């Protein structure tokens, strides 16, 4: 209980036999006081006992037990000896140390380590007891031990930090600030670690150093007002601020007021990793800088290295970026606005957040008044300054298709809480999910297909791993500084039909893919099919293959537009789907290629949704991990059986549209076309499809919604350029990978409808296998009774002329009524060939 490790009297051993028989060499040796031996002799005997213990392991003899027996004999021969009693804690520690000593003794050279430990222990015990410890009464020895233990603890508490500081001063150098700032490159890497881009923080060479004399005094004081109003009187580091930061670190928070000197050291020299080591280095370097440099020099270096936003490092570059003038010409109000940016430049740029910037400006200006650096009259007449518009900076961002990857990565980082300020000040190492081969395949597929085509055509291609949501390829155009077409919203056309089918499969009762419809267009009705897409008895799978508009409009009406919108959202569509109407069945909603790839990936992954992402891992230059995407399990949004039925309905589309994959690789997908307001012309064309391991979404259109055409004037459909790009990309990306198949197909309702296409060039309206679901010819107004297969035959229910939203409106226009006197735009696919 007293925590000592002194020898126990014989009476105590007799009273507590379990302690005496603990079997430990250390504990037993100290329970055996011997009047004829000195303390040093007994310690020597203990060391000799440890050596013998190591030597007797081969014979199975336990030296500790032998010494325990020998100790009991000695105790019997020595009737009385005054010694402090051993506490329970000390006995437990002794037992543990003895067990450790036995294990260490088995290591190569372990006996020497044990002897060294015994030597240290002996000196510690000698210090605690003193030279005359044997002659002192028990109470006096206990008091001496506790007193000296306190001295040792106090000396350690004071000595270790002092020694650490001394060593820090001797061993930690002051880095060169210029080299530290200029070397902060952000590295964006492909998934295999190869470099995709190296991006410099700010424009190359934009950091123009100026002397402190060139910075107007009011501007200097504005910076002090914003960041450190006691700069000229403090020691360079704030002890209370460091202690507060340490406490926040310990409790899981962030923060802690830093002086300008500490900010300068952190931003330019040691980084902003949240660790005790970084804080220690910051403290040492701040103290050394305070000793070696004048305050004016420190402020000058700070102003020349701090980041002000807009890619501007240093106050001279910032003055040009925000006011288009040299720093010498800055007014107090302009200096205060810039000073207010320092803590969060991207957040408080007036072009981004005018209210926030004005609040910071007010704080700085009022601080200047309270510090006596600005008169109340000047403050009252000051107005918030007007800045020049921000301009784009290259900073090493690639100007080809990789530029879109970098910008998409930057946007994703911001959504993860890693803003532009961190991106340009912490030398981030960003590992993306982009596969370099897949990216090359996508780029080559687009460029090869667009060779010799009209120059106004624009294309996007996005590929996703459906099992993880990782973006494997991201092509938003060849101009990395231009519009990213992978993020442009365009009407989906017939690529939205799988979501109509998803809603039908989840309907109560479910409508299976073998359910038959009358898919013939009715003269005078708004909804029409393209030539060759009519079918009188059309299963839903066949209607998907033919891209029959009449059938899917009727199906959308049967389940309801809201159910279609809900199904699309369930699969992964993030676009607004407010107030849906019947035109949603034919894709009158605007979506992005990324959205389409992510939602089809849910079908490919048996109903499990993964949010698409390009960022895999982010670390700072100092090695701190800011983000690691590993471990996302996804979300089961759709029943696997239902998802497999949607896939089955799209299985014949690639073959029918001439986009089958090499080697007979199983694939599923859907083409789509959005008709122009001009007769016989189209505005947008799509192909979205997948294998079990890769999804790809391809869009083709123009910048101004002009018709998309081949050089000879023929309109481009989804089964043309988009499906060719998709086919070439997929054949490249799956090359050399194991052949995979989709899971077993079990109809949700009805039976297997069979194959609905046999190969490229098959004419629309034909089938190699008649649908297995039989049904009576439906009437125009009622739903027939369920057939023997358990499915009901649904009438075409074609809307009356003029019904709103029955077809997708021309791109860029809302869905509207079709003119009664003119043919309405029709969305659909013509027969291949």
Image (tube, helix red, strand yellow):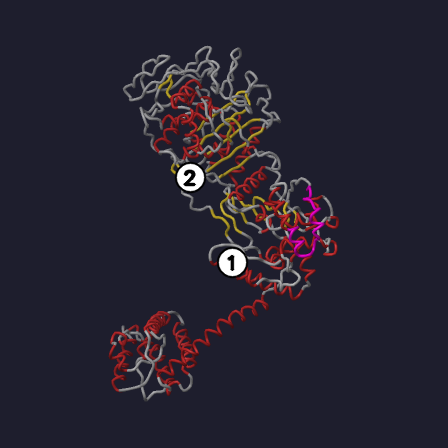
Give how far across and how far down residue 99 sits, in percent.
33, 70
Vertical position of residue 643 compared to residue 773: above or below: below
Which residue is at a point 65% across and 51% down the rendered structure image? 366
Q: Magenta span has 376?
A: yes
Give how far across and how far down residue 637 sits, in percent.
39, 35
Nearer the camera: disc 1 or disc 2: 1
Callout 2 secondary element? loop
Vertical position of residue 179 compared to residue 754: above or below: below
Q: Which residues are magenta?
A: 364-387
Label of residue 275 in the image: 1
Which residue is at a point 34% across and 70% down the rendered structure image? 96
Q: How many C-alpha atoms fall within 10 Å of the one at disc 1: few (<14), some, or many (≥20)?
A: few
Give how far across and how far down residue 199 sits, in percent.
60, 46
- State the image quarter where residue 6 is shown: bottom left
Give how far across and how far down residue 174 sits, in percent.
62, 62
Label of residue 467 in the image: 2
Residue 231 seen from this side? yes
- State the image quarter where residue 557 is shown: top left
- Tally of numbered tags: 2
How far apart are labels 1 and 2 at the CA level?
A: 36 Å
Comes first in the chain, label 1 or label 2: 1
Which residue is at a point 42% across and 24% down the rendered structure image? 561
Task: Using the image as rendered, state which of residue 509 and residue 111 is in the foreground.
Answer: 509
Vertical position of residue 831 compared to residue 136: above or below: above
Callout 1 secondary element? loop
Name the side, left or right, on which 490 lies relative to 80.
Answer: right
Quarter holding the N terminus? bottom left
């Amino acid at each position: 209980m007293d925590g000592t490790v002194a020898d126990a009297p014989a009476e105590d051993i007799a009273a507590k036999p379990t302690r005496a028989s603990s079997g430990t060499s250390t504990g037993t040796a100290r329970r055996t006081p011997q009047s004829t031996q000195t303390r040093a002799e007994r310690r020597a005997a203990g060391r000799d006992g440890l050596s013998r213990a190591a030597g007797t392991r081969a014979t199975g003899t336990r030296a500790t037990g032998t010494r325990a027996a020998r100790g009991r004999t000695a105790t019997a021969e020595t009737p009385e000896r005054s010694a402090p009693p051993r506490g329970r804690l000390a006995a437990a520690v002794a037992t543990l140390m003895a067990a450790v000593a036995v294990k260490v003794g088995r290591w190569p050279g372990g006996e020497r380590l044990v002897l060294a430990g015994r030597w240290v222990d002996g000196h510690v015990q000698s210090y605690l007891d003193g030279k005359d410890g044997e002659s002192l009464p028990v109470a006096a020895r206990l008091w001496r031990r506790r007193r000296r233990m306190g001295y040792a603890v106090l000396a350690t508490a004071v000595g270790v930090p002092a020694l650490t500081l001394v060593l820090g001063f001797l061993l930690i150098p002051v880095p060169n600030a210029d080299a530290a700032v200029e070397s902060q490159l952000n590295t964006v890497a492909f998934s295999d670690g190869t470099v995709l881009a190296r991006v410099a923080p700010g424009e190359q060479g934009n950091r123009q150093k100026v002397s402190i004399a060139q910075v107007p005094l009011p501007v200097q004081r504005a910076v002090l007002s914003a960041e450190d109003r006691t700069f000229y009187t403090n020691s360079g580091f704030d002890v209370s601020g460091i202690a507060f930061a340490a406490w926040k670190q310990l409790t899981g928070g962030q923060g802690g007021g830093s002086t300008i000197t500490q900010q300068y050291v952190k931003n330019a020299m040691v980084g902003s990793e949240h660790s005790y080591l970084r804080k220690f280095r910051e403290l040492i370097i701040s103290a050394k800088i305070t000793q070696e440099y004048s305050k004016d020099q420190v402020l000058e270096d700070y102003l020349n290295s701090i980041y002000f936003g807009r890619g501007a490092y240093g106050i001279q570059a910032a003055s040009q970026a925000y006011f288009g003038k040299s720093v010498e010409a800055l007014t107090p109000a302009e200096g205060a606005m810039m000073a207010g940016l320092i803590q969060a430049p991207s957040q408080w740029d007036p072009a981004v957040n005018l209210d926030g910037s004005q609040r910071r400006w007010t704080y700085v200006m009022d601080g200047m008044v309270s510090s006596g650096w600005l008169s109340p009259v000047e403050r009252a007449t000051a107005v918030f300054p007007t800045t020049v518009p921000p301009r784009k900076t290259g900073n090493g961002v690639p100007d080809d298709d990789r530029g879109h990857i970098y910008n998409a990565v930057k946007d994703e980082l911001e959504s993860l809480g890693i803003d532009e300020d961190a991106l340009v000040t912490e030398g981030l190492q960003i590992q993306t999910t982009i596969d370099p081969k897949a990216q090359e395949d996508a780029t080559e597929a687009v460029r090869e297909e667009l060779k010799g085509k009209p120059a106004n055509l624009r294309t996007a291609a996005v590929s996703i791993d459906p099992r993880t949501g990782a973006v494997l390829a991201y092509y938003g155009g060849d101009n990395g500084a231009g519009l990213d077409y992978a993020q442009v919203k365009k009407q989906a056309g017939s690529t939205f039909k799988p979501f109509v089918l998803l809603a039908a499969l989840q309907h109560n009762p479910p409508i299976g893919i073998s359910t038959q419809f009358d898919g013939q267009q009715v003269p005078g009705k708004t909804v029409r099919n393209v030539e060759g897409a009519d079918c009188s008895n059309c299963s839903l799978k066949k209607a998907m293959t033919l891209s029959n508009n009449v059938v899917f409009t009727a199906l959308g009406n049967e389940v309801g537009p809201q159910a279609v919108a809900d199904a699309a959202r369930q699969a992964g569509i993030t676009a607004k789907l407010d107030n849906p109407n019947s035109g949603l069945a034919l894709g009158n909603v605007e979506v992005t290629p990324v959205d389409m790839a992510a939602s089809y990936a849910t079908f490919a992954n048996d109903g499990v949704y993964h949010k698409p992402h390009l960022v895999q891992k982010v670390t700072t230059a100092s090695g701190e991990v800011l983000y690691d995407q590993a471990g996302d399990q996804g979300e089961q949004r759709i029943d696997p059986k239902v998802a497999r039925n949607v896939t089955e309905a799209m299985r014949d589309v690639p073959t029918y549209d001439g986009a089958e994959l090499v080697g007979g690789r199983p694939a599923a997908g859907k083409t789509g076309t959005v008709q122009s307001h001009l007769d016989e012309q189209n505005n947008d064309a799509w192909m979205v499809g997948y294998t079990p391991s890769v999804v790809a979404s391809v869009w083709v259109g123009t910048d101004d919604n002009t018709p998309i055409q081949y050089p000879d004037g023929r309109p481009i459909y989804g089964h043309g350029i988009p499906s060719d790009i998709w086919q070439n990309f997929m054949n490249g990306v799956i090359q050399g990978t194991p052949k995979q198949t989709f899971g077993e197909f079990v109809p949700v309702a009805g039976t297997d409808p069979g194959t609905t296409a046999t190969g490229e060039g098959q004419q629309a309206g034909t089938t190699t296998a008649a649908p297995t679901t039989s049904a009576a010819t439906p009437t125009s107004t009622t739903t027939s009774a369920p057939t023997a297969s358990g499915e009901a035959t649904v009438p075409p229910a074609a809307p009356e002329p003029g019904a709103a939203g029955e077809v997708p409106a021309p791109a860029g226009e809302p869905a509207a009524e079709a003119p009664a006197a003119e043919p309405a735009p029709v969305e659909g696919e013509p027969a291949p060939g």
